[in-house]
Amino acid sequence: MTITATSTSAPETERVEPEVLLDVRAISKSFGGRVVLNDMSMRVHAGEVVAFLGANGSGKSTTLRAVNGLIEADSGDIEITGVRLNEASSARKAEARRAAATVFQKIHLVPRRTALQNVCAGGFSRLPAWRSIPPLFGDELKEEAMACLERVGLADRAHDKAGSLSGGQQQRVAIARALCQRPRMILADEPVSALDPRAADDVMRLLRQLAVEEGLGVAAVLHQPQLARLYADRVIGLRDGHLVFDCPTAELDDTELAALYL
C-alpha cells in the first residue's frame, strides 16, 4: 500500500496592510500664479515615519499645510483617517484635522507658562472656552498632560517655565502638547532645523518611538538626509513642487537624493 505524504505546514497568513491615516491625492497649489505644488500624491500609514526631503521651496511644507488646513489646495483630495475633506461637513473636517497634530519649527510655547500648562493647551479643543484659563484646566486634563510629559521624558520639568528650557526640551514639550490633542498622526514641519545635532537626534528618536510604540503615523519635513536615513521608513523627494520619488529608506538612491538640491 502506498501512503501519500501530506503537508503539515501551516497555511501562509495574509499580510495585513497597516491602516492608511493620510491619503493625499493629486493636490496642487499656486501662489500668485506660481505653482508650488503640482499633482502631489502620497500616503502615511499607522506606525510609519515618512520624511520629506527637498530644497527650500520644493513643496514640502506646503503639502503639510494643506493637510492641517493652514492653506487650501487648489485641486485634488485629502483624506485623514478615512474622512475625505472635500466632502466632509465643517464639523467633520475639523474633527479629522484634529487627528493630525502639528509640530512646527517655531515651537510656539508660552514662555512664562509652565511646561505642564503649555501641554494642557493640546486638550483645549475638548474643553469649553471658559476652561482654557490655567486655574480652570481641571485635574483630568492636568493628569493627561503630565502623562504626555512623562512620555517625552520631561515629567521632572513639568512645573518649570517653558522659557527656561533648552531648545530640544521645548520641542519635546511641543510634541507632548501634540500628544495631548489625542492625535492619530503627527505632522512635523521642520521640527529639528533650529536644534543642535544632539537635540535633533533626540527629537527624531522620540518621533520614531511614538510611531513604533504608539502606532502613530509621522510625516516630517527635514533638511537633514542623514536623519531621514536613520529614522524614516519611507522618504519622499520633492523638487520644484513635483514628486521625484517615494521609496523605502533602504532603497534611497544617492544620485536621486543629490538631484533634489541641484
Image: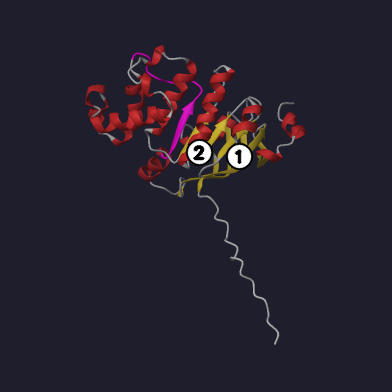
Q: Residue furthest top?
A: 164
Between 48 and 85, which is closer to the camera in this rendering?
A: 48
- Is 108 contained in the magenta span? yes
Label disc, if present, on residue 233 of the rendered structure: 1
Expressed as whole percent of the image width and height from the top left, the position of residue 197 reads 59, 19
State the residue at coordinates (68%, 80%). 4
Q: In which image quadrant can residue 141 be found?
A: top left
Q: Amino acid at mark 2?
A: Ala
230 lies left or right of 213? right
- Is 104 contained in the magenta span? yes
Between 31 and 106, which is closer to the camera in this rendering?
A: 106
Is residue 211 positioned above or below 58 on the image?
below
State the residue at coordinates (60%, 28%). 222
How far apart are the two marked residues, 2 and 1, measured between alpha carbons?
10 Å
Expressed as whole percent of the image width and height from the top left, the position of residue 130 reads 22, 28
Q: What secondary structure is marked by label 2? A: helix
Instruction: Tell me if residue 72 can be seen.
Output: no
What residue range appears in magenta? 99-112
The residue labelled by disc 2 is 211
| Whether label 2 touches label 1, CB < 8 Å | yes
Between 101 and 251, which is closer to the camera in this rendering?
A: 251
State the residue at coordinates (50%, 34%). 187
Q: In which image quadrant can residue 37 be found?
A: top right
Q: What secondary structure is marked by label 1? A: loop
Q: Amino acid at mark 1?
A: Asp
Q: Residue furthest front?
A: 1
